[in-house]
Amino acid sequence: METSGTIGSKMERNVLRVETESAPSYSRAVSVTDTRKDYHIHEPIAIFLQHLSSFPLKPCASSRQMAALPNLTQLNLVRFCEHSQTIQSHRPKPPNPPNSEYHRKNLTVLCKRAKISEEGWKKKKKQGFVDYDKGEHQVESHVSGLRKNDIPRRYRLRVEGDRFQKDCSVSEVVQKISGLNHSDDIDGVLNHWIGRFARKNFPILMKEITQLGSIEHAINVFHWMKNQKNYCARNDIYNMMIRLHARYNRTDQARGLFFEMQAWRCKPDAETYNALINAHGRAGQWRWAMNIMEDMLRAAIPPSRSTYNNLINACGSSGNWREALKICKQMTDNGVGPDLVTHNIVLSAYKTGAQYSKALSYFELMKGTNILPDTTTLNIVIDCLVKLGQYGKAIDYFNSMREKRSECHPDVVTFTSIIHMYSKCRQIENCKAVFDTMLAEGLRPNIVAYNALLGSFASHGMGKEAALIFNEIKQNGLRPDVITYTSLLNAYGRSQQPEKAQKIFDAMKRNNCKPNVVSYNALIDAYGSNGLLAEAVEVLREMEREKIQPNVVSISILLAACGRCGQRVNIDSILSAAELRGIKLNTVAYNSAIGSYLNLGEYDKALALYRSMRKSKVKPDSVTYNVLINGCCKLSNYKMAIDFLHEMMNLKIPFSKEVYTSAIYAYSKQGQVGEAESMFASMIMAGYHPDVITYTTMIHAYGAAENCSKAISIFHKMEAKDVQPDAVSCAALMRVFNKGHQPENVLSLLRYIKEKKIPITDAVYFEVISACSLLRDWRTTVDLIKIIEPSFHEVSVGLLNQLLHFFGKCGKIDTMMKLFLKLVTSGAEINISTYSILLRNLLAAGHWRKYMEVLQWMLDAGIQPSTGMLQSMLFFAQRSISSEHAAVVRERIGRMLMSIDLKIYHCLSGGCRKNHHQLDLHAREERKGGLFDADSMAYDDIVCSFSDNVGFLYYV
């Protein structure tokens, strides 16, 4: 049964709907539904309302009848409930059985003072979806907004017969807009939405659009909104737009919206000023933020805690941590206490200002307060510990956050910081393991986490792995940003794939990701590090055409590339170009230029540039002196290297590990082993852990001093410190053994290398062959040849020559010739030195026929025999074989002379007196080159013997 009575003369009264429900159990509660709330009242009120339903009411009650009715406001209903015991005791029976047509009664009473109910059209409703088969779940928030039945009737009649008008919810409209490009017809979608006639939908629509983060879509929707007739400017809409522009560092547009809202007669409130301060803080304009704070005070708007937090963040994010602390003090003086957000902002300000130790001290003070740290706080602390190199403490905090009872669980930022830490430690396997752990714990990595993993692969030149991560980013629906592309450029550049780097750079521009100066520098380095200087310069020119000014990093990369390519002229031109563009060189640029000059052997220019650096008041660092000391050592100017070391000490510049190693090498070359040992001890006292390069340098030092025992001792010390020896250190120790006449230790060390699975290089093979030569152990050498044979084409010429010389010296002529033929068959590099060793050993063994055959092989291979080779054969034919055979030898040599260069023929047949001096010099050179033994004959005898046969050669 449903009755309705009208109280008062106005029909616009609020409705109080009471639903009574009769059941067999006679429920003692009824539901009263108001347009604002649902009231739950007791049975006495329901009894009263049942009596009230039989009260006769006329369509228009008089004032006296109105006075006879009780006031049914909420307050009077509650009072009536308290004084209803009498009515409850005389409760009548239910007028109808439970199964009658009056089983459910709806009573509508128009109340005078009932407030408007707030319905759920503004609220978000979560909708979930779970697929147990695929193990996927999805939760979405749905906002309905005002629909067709909620808009005014005149608009409802207007769209009633239009089939193109869609009665969509706000969330559905936002989903349609997000699926469009910002250049598509977004206005068309909105103009077919019935909810546009309800002004209250506009703030909800703008809130949902701005939460998507697409600023182009939000701007288009905002422009459409302002063109609607029912639009009314609101502070909350402008505040959302200002915050969205702040997210994209569009400070000028945010400030323009601030003035626009005042032109639309919207008075800015505290949230507006907070959003504007946040916009300038994100852009690093902390002075503008301070001025806005002053404008806020002049407008008599009291700053809130959020205002102070935004202002502290504006100063701290710009690195001005001192100003941030002043504002924090001003905040407490004004009676606004800091909260957890304030403490996190102060910690972040210390971190941005590179004050990592102060950040950790502030964190210790924070522990004494009643404010507990959250995940953001611990993330900042972990990052500071990583920057200070305290990796153990960082791991401890990370593990404590992963405990089950921890109140602060790690998030994506935490895992990203740990990935950065392992990347700095060069532990790439741990980087991937941490990333996989993040996925296993159900965290979805963002683009920053992917960039951290991609950057770790790029820093080690792992181009293939970096490309896999890049493809995974696109497969997971994330859009690669400029950092992603730049990291991939670095990966390809360091893996010596500049062509792929160029393709990625072109794809970057095609995908509307504008390269910045760092991206261009990465591409320049990709070309320059691989010796393609012309392409690197062309990228620099393209960079200037795109109106991106090169910086000092660009100049440093080009200077380093010139040193690698060996182009001294380009170094001067690049320095001139930097001066014309007003680019002031910093320490890194000077270091690159000095190192390039020293690599080219231009010591004077490098020294002049160093003096210019000091004159320009650019402070040198440890890298500068390491470049100078190392360059002087390469030029064998060890005295000057030690002078630079003393100058570095006078300037009190702390030594790096590389400087210690270079100094040890310089002292060892000067024969000052004591100073080298002192420098090694100072390195350990300074807290540096010597690496394999340092230990190898000490082995070289002891080898130069012929102190074999200390070289062995330092090698064992390296093993005790868990420093894995490499092929270079093993070769250095082998050289010490060979010099100390301990070739048997060389073979023992070879067995150690095989046990440790250390790659064997040419230097190791060379020392082993030398040891076998001393021991006359040609069987071990044959075993080595079997190992080397598959890679003959990769082995150096010096090692191959050493093998041939060893077999020839041992008298194994047949083995030497077989090895030579294998070298020819494998395509190994063979030069005139190889033939010289072969001929010398053949002649020493008396194999003059094979000697003549090898000479013919040289001519067939296009290698011109030297004068000494022909002289040796003529002398041997004159002294050691019969006259008949000697005549054959002279005849064959004469034929060879007819086919070789006429200049040598003229030299050999131009007369004894005229060319005696030239032949004399050539014989001296051949003797210095080791082609003749000292006891065989004097070079004067060679010249005279050859002069006796000139007539016959000329006749031939």
Image (cartoon, rainbow, N blue to C red):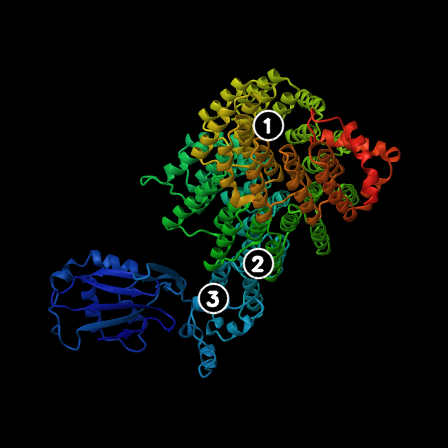
| Eye-nearest disc, 2 or 1 | 1
Is 368 on the left or on the right of 551, as rendered? left
Q: Position of residue 647 (x, y in %)?
A: 70, 22
* Residue underneath mark 3: 174
- SS label for mark 1: loop
Which numbered dot is residue 266? 2
* Residue underneath mark 1: 656
Q: Which residue occupies the foreground of this view, 950 or 864?
A: 950
The single residue placed furthest to the right in the displayed view is 914
* Picture residue at 49% right of the left edge, 24% below the top: 745
The single residue placed furthest to the top in the displayed view is 674
* Residue 134, above or below 647: below
User: Decide: marks 2, 1 in contact (CB < 8 A)?
Assistant: no
* Residue 595, above or below 676: below
| Separation (CA) of disc 3 from disc 2 | 26 Å
* Residue 910, above or below 226: above
| Eye-nearest disc, 3 or 1 | 1
Is 727 on the left or on the right of 831, as rendered? left
Mark found first going from the N terminus, 3 or 2 = 3
